[in-house]
Image (cartoon, grey):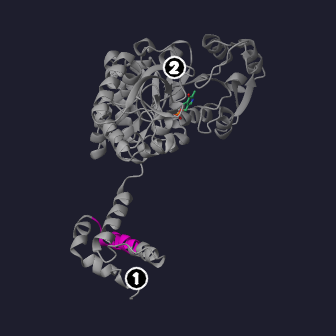
Amino acid sequence: MTDPRRRIPGVDRLLASPECRPLLDAHPADRVSAHLRDAVAHVRERVTLGDVPETVEDASLYVDMAAEALLAEEAPSLRPVLNATGVVLHTNLGRAPLARSALDAAARVGAGYSNLEFDLESGRRGSRYVHSASLLRELTGAEDALVVNNCAAALVLAVNTLAAGREVAVSRGELVEIGGGFRIPEILDRAGAVLLEVGSTNRTRIDDYRKALGAGGACAILKVHRSNFRISGFTEEATLGELAELGRESGVPLVHDVGSGLLADPSLLGLPDEPRPALSLAGGADLVVFSGDKLLGGPQAGLVVGRSDLVARLRANPLCRALRVDKGTLAALEATLRLYRDPPRAVREIPALRMLATPVTELGERGTRLAERAREAGLRLEVVASVGAVGGGTYPGVELDSRALRLEPGPGGADELAETLRRGDPPVVGRREEGALLLDLRTVDPADDETLLARLLEAVRLGTTP
Ligand SMILES: *Cc1c(COP(=O)(O)O)cnc(C)c1O
């Protein structure tokens, strides 16, 4: 008998086959031949081990393998995911989804040229930093504003500008890690400042700050919001008002890192209060830094608002150039901020705010509709109570009452079910609970319900859920 390896067609013959035509029409020839070579090598290996496919002579065997590899190769690495975790500002899933008007603004500005650094009035060179500044002034009451890449960058810039080579007074209770390796002591160090620790972990009084500043070395007070944890029990901290007064007496600016950047009234979202940039400025902070993509619900950005002389110094720092923000970000940020002029509209149109404000009854009704449709298609699932979170290192301990679809795993267990949902298109990321998989509806856009259902039915077909 002839060696079965001789029955494997050569790559040239495969390239010339009619089966290969559609692939060559859609993809570069060198990629097609590379994948055909891989397919041939793979089949050759099987055949050598004695496993001869029935269709070993057919071009379609190799062309289909190449087609699948080409498809995988062309899928973007960064792509949309359905967030069914119930965590609204999920840092690993891209934090805040953008409002329609923000996406449109970024697309319009990105598709062509813009007046990014061009003053249309005078026809002369302008500054990219003017574009969101007036809205930020209007919304926070600040004298001036500056936008950089993220809140971490804003803090580095503020500390480096105000205190390079000098001391910054920070309470020991606020030497926090924000997440992703962002630790206040290390950030201060890298920003070139010297950390002046004040008070103790659980109690820091205004007199502790006064004593620390009395030594004369400090040239800024930094107050950091403990975004992602709470301390309780025998605790005490100096108020913002006390710190502002001490700062004025001592002639050192007070910088407040509020983190989340809540611009809306939290009662509109059914959430407790949280430091807000406007309130912090009104309370006497000289500079406030916050994130664009946490509770503000905009693009990743770091916003600085406050005293115009200090903002001008930050803008003049060469480091500002290294932390410079992109035009797409500026366009999306400006459009997002504009929505806040009408707070109920902001809650309707900014996805993160809308998800936070959605009444749980509405989630329950959606769940029931989805479960009915799923049952008609032969999929069993239940609607159950679920607990979501705001996320993004904000509102620690605040539980969002929510509703989820509960799926029983097939014989492969919850791991296999979760993997099936993760690996499809679009990937669906849920939450594991007691051997089942929960798909929390608060963080799924209702416009994606059909897609979610289709992915669930696919999981049934693949046998990873009964
Ligand atoms: C989240 C957070 C930061 C970092 O914000 P990014 O925009 O992610 O860089 C800084 N400070 C506080 C208090 C935060 O909560």
Residue ID at (52%, 37%): 316
Residue 137: % across, % down: 42, 21
Ligand 1 is within 8 Å of the C-beta of the residue at disc 1: no
Quadrant where the image shows the N terminus: bottom left
How busy is the neighbourhood of tag 2: few (under 14 within 10 Å), some, or many (20 plus)?
Answer: few
Q: Earlier in the sequence, mark 2 or mark 1?
A: 1
Confirm whether residue 221 shows in the render: yes
The stretch of residues the image draws in magenta is 27-39
Residue 292 part of the magenta-drawn span? no
Q: Relative to the observer, which residue lies in front, 365 or 246?
A: 365
The amino acid at mark 1 is: Arg
Q: Is residue 327 above or below residue 50?
A: above
Quarter holding residue 213:
top right
What residue is at 43 percent from the left and 25 percent from the top? 296
Q: Amino acid at mark 2?
A: Glu
Name the side, left or right, on which 196 lies relative to 404.
Answer: right
Residue drawn where x is 30% and y is 68% of the image = 28
Dot label at residue 399: 2
Question: In the drawing, does residue 99 fall left or right of residue 275?
Answer: left
Across and down, in percent, residue 387 comes to 49, 23
* Residue annotated with mark 1: 5
Q: Position of residue 358 (x, y in %)?
A: 37, 19
Q: Main secondary structure of the magenta part?
A: helix
